[in-house]
Amino acid sequence: MALVATENYSESYGASYGESYGEAFAAPSAAAAMTPAAEQKHLLAYAPLVKKIVRQLNSQVAGAIDREDMEQIGLMGLLEALRRYGEPDAGFGSYASLRIRGAILDELRRQDWRPRAVRQQSHKLRDAVRALTRKLGREPTEQEAIAGLGITADEYMAYQLDENAEVLASFDDLLQEQGSEAGAGHTPGPEEQLMVRRSLEQALNGLNEREQRVVQMYYEFELSYKEIAAVLDLTDARVCQLNKAALNKMKAVLQA
């Protein structure tokens, strides 16, 4: 698989990714109504986007929702995006991705998809990882965490996926807040769109090269964690860890 060159990587990728999400926030507030036939045509055209997003999220929620049900929820998000946006153009894909992902995450939160025991175990492991981090004076490696916590590699991977799902949900919430600070029904003007893009570019430029590559492959190329791990010759858990770290860094910049 071809990857972008590392030279000027931060500037070129940060600009393209920031521009993509900046366009996503510029949906018209009063889109012209589509005919049912037009809606059906566009739903079919963008159905592969729904499947890609479901494939990404499905690996993080441990079968909490049936895959077909997730696709139906995603299609409803796509339909809502079409009705709010109007006739798709070059910026619609980014806008629709946010709405599709948001619809699925909202349903997961509504169903409280993590059993109480799983939530308690996740919090216990989180506290243990923090204690180990303080002891080492740095973030533990995967092997150090597994040995220090007395858990298996599969349990550590499940913990990372659980943590990532929470971080991803809160990051998506933040992105949507960034695009709707002026209130519902407001269409961002060119200056507001530029500010959003610049903020995202700044957040991306604050990541190290490996974190940027993980973010690129996950959000732009829409690869799963397993596929990213194969490309970068890392474990799935390490990819989860890098993605979580990248999102937390970006959140800090966007909230500053």
Image: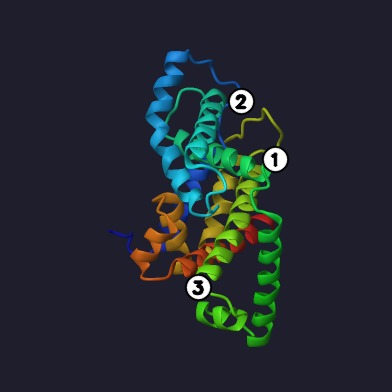
Relative depth, front residue between 149 and 253: 149
Q: Distance between the residues labelled 1 and 3?
A: 42 Å
Q: What element carries label 3?
A: helix
The answer to whether 9 is drawn above or below residue 171 in the figure is below
Crowding at mark 2 (Cα within 10 Å: few <14, some 14-19, many 20+): some
The answer to whether 132 is drawn above or below residue 117 in the figure is below
- Name the residue tied to disc 1: 181
Residue 20 in sight: yes
Amino acid at pointer 1: Glu
Q: In the image, residue 149 lies at what x, y percent?
A: 62, 79
Relative depth, front residue between 134 and 3: 134
Which label number is shown at residue 153? 3
Disc count in the image? 3
Give the label, 2 or 3, closer to the camera.
3
Q: Distance between the residues labelled 2 and 3?
A: 48 Å
Instruction: Determine whether, in the image, residue 48 is placed left or right of residue 136.
Output: left
Q: Tag 3 or tag 1, which sits nearer the N-term? A: 3
- Name the residue tied to disc 2: 29
Amino acid at pointer 2: Ser
Q: Tag 3 or tag 2, which sits nearer the N-term? A: 2
Quadrant of the image containing the C terminus:
bottom right
Q: What element carries label 1?
A: loop
The answer to whether 79 is drawn above or below residue 231 in the figure is above
